[in-house]
């Protein structure tokens, strides 16, 4: 019988609370002010070996706190967390050589050193031989389009260029488990696309690699993640594949039809068998019809009824739910409504 691999990452009832200061800015605290803030509240998750797992959540949901615990930078208040089968508290020294982390927007690196020197230094800290380090550095700089800046001091780089260097740093140690916290934050569309293409290729090259990704970009999560968890206020609200999560928020199949104006064949659509609801709106050139169906097979009867009534169907489109729909259903608002987060 095959040997079952332990989860790449597992947390059980993981909790992290922070004690709030009694006084701020010299003012007396309110009588009803809480003494503690709970960043993680009993989080239980399992990430499989070889999986690209995503975390979605608004600002302050607990994503970064969770990553800091998993990368041994922060101790939990309660519960347990294991990375590659090792406890993050008692076996932190054994975990660190196996992992790496990239955080979007961080200002890592030594300004007096150039890009190649900074990346070489990080590689040597991990014990990567110099020849191997330089080969990986050159390959990664090519991936992110930073080859022409290899000899430039970090202090002379733009914010986007520093983010590209940080991204390279995450891969030159060839980690078994990699944590990417907003890796494309602040990057242009072309650079972000190149990074997504590389991440998919990197995961395919070795099946034992595991990657945990946090992102504010729904399309990025949908494109990259095998599974993802939605987290808010320190709790996991849902965990599944992007496709399954989207199915759960759509109770009825939805179709949009665009009709040429003319004879009225749409006003009684709601009475047809299998049609849960039908709504219409008009424009100067078309009639737009939205139908919610009890069963998807009813769309044929809808189209037949319209044609028989003299209607002319210009277009027919099934409306698919998005991860944004899932997020709004679970959290109550979109990510774009978070302060400081755009679209």
Image (cartoon, helix red, strand yellow):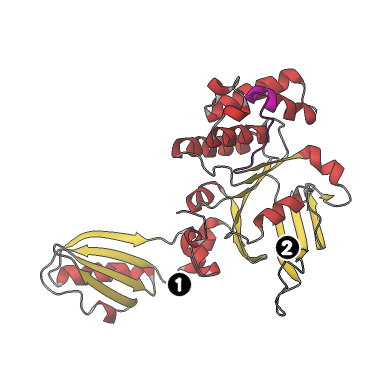
User: Residue at the front extreme?
Assistant: 26
Residue 47 in view: no
* Relative image position of residue 112 (x, y in whole percent): 68, 25
Q: Is residue 234 above or below residue 105?
A: below
Q: Quadrant of residue 173?
A: top right
- Regarding residue 245, the answer to whether it shows in the image is yes
* Residue beneath the point at 43% across and 62% down: 321
Across and down, in percent, residue 242 comes to: 53, 56
State yes or no: residue 106 in magenta.
Answer: yes
Viewer-closest of 60 and 260: 60
Of tags 1 and 2, which is closer to the observer? 2
Closer to the camera in the image, 274 or 133: 133
112 vs 101: above or below:
above
Position of 322 with respect to 4 (left or right) is left
The residue under the point 52% across, 27% down is: 145
Query: Going by the picture, which residue comes out furthest to the left?
Result: 262
Residue named by callout 1: 251
Q: CA distance from mark 1 to mark 2?
A: 27 Å
Q: Is residue 334 left or right of residue 9?
A: left
Residue 113 x/y as whole percent: 68, 24
Q: Quadrant of the C terminus?
A: bottom left
Q: Is residue 121 left or right of residue 245?
A: right
Is residue 320 magenta-colored? no
Label 2 environment density (alpha carbons within 10 Å; few <14, some 14–19, many ≥20): some
> Could you tell me which secondary element the residue under label 2 belongs to?
strand
Circle number at residue 44 = 2
Position in image of residue 256 (x %, y %): 29, 64
- Residue 307 against residue 55 in the figure, above or below: below
Label 1 element class:
loop
Tell me where the magenta segment starts and ends, as one range.
105-119
Residue at the image position 55 percent from the left and 26 percent from the top: 146
Q: Quadrant of residue 36?
A: bottom right
């Amino acid at each position: 019988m095959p040997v079952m691999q332990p989860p790449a990452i597992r947390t059980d009832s993981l909790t992290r609370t922070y004690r709030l200061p009694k006084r701020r800015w010299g003012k007396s605290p309110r009588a009803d002010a809480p003494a503690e803030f709970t960043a993680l509240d009993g989080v239980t998750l399992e990430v499989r070996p070889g999986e690209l797992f995503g975390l979605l959540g608004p600002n302050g949901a607990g994503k970064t706190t969770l990553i800091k615990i998993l990368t041994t930078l922060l101790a939990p208040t309660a519960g347990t967390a294991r990375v590659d089968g090792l406890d993050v508290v008692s076996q932190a020294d054994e975990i660190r050589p196996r992992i790496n982390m990239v955080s979007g927007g961080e200002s890592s690196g030594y300004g007096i050193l150039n890009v190649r020197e900074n990346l070489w230094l990080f590689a040597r800290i991990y014990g990567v031989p110099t020849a191997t380090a330089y080969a990986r550095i050159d390959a990664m700089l090519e991936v992110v389009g930073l080859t022409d800046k290899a000899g430039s001091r970090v202090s002379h780089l733009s914010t986007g260029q520093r983010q590209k260097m940080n991204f390279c740093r995450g891969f030159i140690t060839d980690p078994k488990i990699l944590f990417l916290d907003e890796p494309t934050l602040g990057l242009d569309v072309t650079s972000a696309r190149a990074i997504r293409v590389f991440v998919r290729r990197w995961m395919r090259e070795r099946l034992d690699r595991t990657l945990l990704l946090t992102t504010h970009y729904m399309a990025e999560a949908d494109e990259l993640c095998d599974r993802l968890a939605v987290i808010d206020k320190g709790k996991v609200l849902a965990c599944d594949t992007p496709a399954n999560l989207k199915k759960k928020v759509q109770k009825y199949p939805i179709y949009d039809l665009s009709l040429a104006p003319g004879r009225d064949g749409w006003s009684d659509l709601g009475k047809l068998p299998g049609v849960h609801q039908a709504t219409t709106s008009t424009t100067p050139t078309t009639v737009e019809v939205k139908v919610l169906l009890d069963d998807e097979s009813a769309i044929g009867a809808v189209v037949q009824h319209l044609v028989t009534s003299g209607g002319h169907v210009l277009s027919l489109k099934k409306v698919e739910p998005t991860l944004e729909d899932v997020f709004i259903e679970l959290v109550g608002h979109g990510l774009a409504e978070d302060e400081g987060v755009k679209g």
